[in-house]
Image: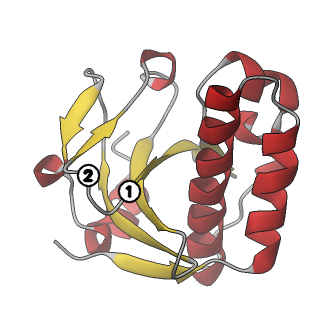
Amino acid sequence: MTSVKINLPNEAYQQAIQFQQQQSSSKQSNIVYFNTLAVYAVFLYFQSWKIETDLPTSDAWDCVMQTLLDVADLNLKNWGKIECRPIFPQHNFVYIPPEVWEERIAYIIVEINEFLRQATLRGFLKRVDSKKIPLEQLHPMKEFMSYLDKGKH
């Protein structure tokens, strides 16, 4: 499986900490922290492809939505929402909450390695209908841009 490595800048961690501190429960603050890093990594990926995003209008950047839902979306202008789901290096599956099963054109799975300050885009899913998906079901990232161009979502 072809993956893409993204170096996370300090501003990604600063944003994640800022959002994390706005949460009252420790469970939700951890979810928001890692969701923010995953979204930021995918945001940087699209910047490298010169694809316009609208990060501020994403639910993942909305304090109320962060508190109410487990969301990690990124709006792509002219395409729709991509869900950016974080995992850790030891994981062999990804958890996709039911609240994000619709209104997404794809799901990009982002492995977060905090110690190396790096994220790895492990692959993507075109659609989901299950909470727990094995990583071997991911499509390689090298196929993502052609999937996006074809508009089959």
Q: Position of residue 152 (x, y in %)?
A: 33, 44
**Residue closer to the observer: 54 or 35:** 35
Which corner quadrant holds the N terminus? Answer: bottom left
How many discs mark residues in the rendered view?
2
Q: Secondary structure at mark 1?
A: loop
Which corner quadrant holds the C terminus? Answer: top left
Q: Residue furthest left?
A: 136
Relative to 76, is 82 on the left or the right? Answer: left
Relative to 143, is 9 on the left or the right? Answer: right
Q: Secondary structure at mark 2?
A: loop
- Residue 139 vs 61, above or below: the answer is below
Give the residue at mark 1: 88
Q: Which mark is residue 20?
A: none
* Gap between marks 1 and 2 measured at Cα: 6 Å
Quadrant of residue 11 in the image?
bottom right
Label 1 CA crowd tier, 10 Å (few <14, some 14–19, many 20+): some
- Residue 16 vs 8, above or below: the answer is above
- Residue 132 vs 73, above or below: the answer is above
Q: At label 2, which amino acid type do we have?
A: His
Q: Are marks 1 and 2 in contact (CB under 8 Å)?
A: yes
Quadrant of residue 51 in the image?
bottom right
Q: Position of residue 27 (x, y in %)?
A: 61, 28
Asked if one can make out residue 78 in the rendered structure from this viewpoint, the answer is no
Residue in view at x 74 percent, y 29 percent: 66
Q: Residue furthest front?
A: 26
Residue in view at x 42 percent, y 23 percent: 101
Relative to 80, is 152 on the left or the right? Answer: left
Q: Position of residue 71 (x, y in %)?
A: 60, 32
Give the residue at mark 2: 91
Q: At label 1, which amino acid type do we have?
A: Phe
Quadrant of residue 7 in the image?
bottom right
Label 2 CA crowd tier, 10 Å (few <14, some 14–19, many 20+): few
